[in-house]
Image (cartoon, grey):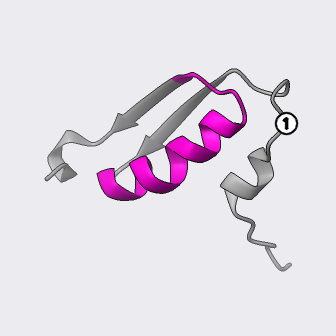
Amino acid sequence: MVIDRQNVLDLIGKNKHKYSSCIITCYTFDFTFFEERVIPTLRLSNIKNINVFLDGKHLE
């Protein structure tokens, strides 16, 4: 069985009526990547309610 990897930001797309919120969970977190790549994609999709849960032990 082969798992087809896809970019979640591409899957969200730019459909402004599909989603209004998102929840992200992670162990590590890159603020620069989040601000430069993730937030603009979410905003283009009209996602305004963004919740991020991460492991505080790995936050630098």
| Residue at image location 13% in from the left, 53% down from the top | 60
Which residue position holds label 1? 15
User: In the picture provided, is 22 more to the left or to the right than 19?
Assistant: left
Around disc 1, counting alpha carbons within 10 Å, would you say few (fewer than 14), some (14 to 19), or many (20 or more)? few
- Total marks shown come to 1
Tell me where residue 23 appears, x and y as whole percent: 55, 30
Q: Main secondary structure of the magenta part?
A: helix
Compared with 37, 39 (above or below) is above
60 drawn magenta: no
Amino acid under disc 1: Asn
Tell me where residue 8 appears, x and y as whole percent: 69, 54
Provide the residue span drawn in magenta. 31-49
Compared with 46, 39 (above or below) is below
Tell me where residue 15 appears, x and y as whole percent: 85, 36
43 drawn magenta: yes
**Dot 1 lies on which element?**
loop
Tell me where residue 1 appears, x and y as whole percent: 86, 78
User: In the picture provided, is 58 more to the left or to the right than 17?
Assistant: left
